[in-house]
Image (tube, rainbow, N blue to C red):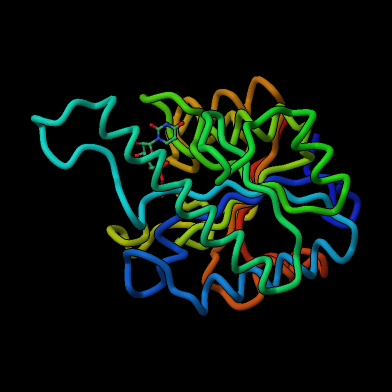
Amino acid sequence: MFMKDIKDMKRILLKLSGEALAGDKKTGFDEATCMDVARQVKVLADRGLQISIVIGGGNFWRGRTSENMERTKADQIGMLATVMNCIYVADAFRTAGLETEVFTPFVCGSFTELFSKDKAVKAMEDGKIAFFAGGTGHPYFSTDTATALRAVEIEADAILLAKSIDGVYDSDPAVNPDAKKYDTISLDEVLDQKLAVVDLTATIMCLENKMPLAVFGLNEPDSIADLLKGKFNGTYVTVK
Ligand code: UDP
């Protein structure tokens, strides 16, 4: 099965890299980038597409800062970083005229809603953008894994993976100037060639559950809104 045209999709999960949201600053948020994402997501939402969002945490926190730090504690901080990211970006979305609901897999008082598939689907059916913050709620996982898990759970048609890099390459273009970008690649090939599109756990989850991905650069102008026009400069990661 190849990927459906986005115009024919009902429900998607958009994963935004935390780093890409920080823009040139590399940490925190670049307000202009976040507002631009909100504007573009509104273009998709106005066409009736049901949209959910996962945001990475790399702009605040990435794993352990030292070997002395216990992994589970570092991961808890990472998960909380993704909650802050979702609260910030959801607010930018509201400024852009979108309705939002932020879900977490653990209780955050009145800040967020506890995740359930039913509540998340209802929010999207009501035209709200559903944010899945806090990852899976478990250490030793990542926001990639949370993306794959939630996309499968909510029966998304595809994952849209907006990264700081503009697609899937056969090697790291920052290291190898001759790196080749794929237009299309299958998840089996991604696994065979150990290409880091998403991490290994997430790759296998997508493979087992036939979840295709569209990988593209967040910082390319209109890369999200242009998906509706069939203008795509990234890589389709397909499933059989
Ligand atoms: N994290 C976790 N479990 C999850 C999701 C995230 O422990 O289910 C932690 C993990 O420490 C990770 C951090 O949150 O390093 C930030 O997520 P991620 O690294 O995936 O963000 P990205 O690098 O994509 O910006």
Q: How many marks?
A: 0
Residue at 11%, 38% in the rendered image: 66
Give the quadrant of residue 75: top left
Expressed as whole percent of the image width and height from the top left, the position of residue 208 reads 65, 20
Expressed as whole percent of the image width and height from the top left, the position of residue 140 reads 36, 24
Residue at 30%, 48% in the rendered image: 61
Q: Would you say residue 145 is visible in this rendering? A: no
State ligand 1's quadrant: top left
Residue 115 left/right relative to 12? left
Relative to the observer, which residue lies in front, 43 or 168? 43
Which quadrant does the C terminus fall into?
A: top right
Q: Is residue 173 above or below residue 203?
A: below
In the displayed orientation, state which residue is furthest to the front.
110
Which quadrant does the N terminus fall into?
A: top right
Expressed as whole percent of the image width and height from the top left, the position of residue 197 reads 49, 43
Q: Is residue 105 above or below residue 77?
A: above
Residue 88 left/right relative to 92? left
Residue 28 left/right relative to 191? left
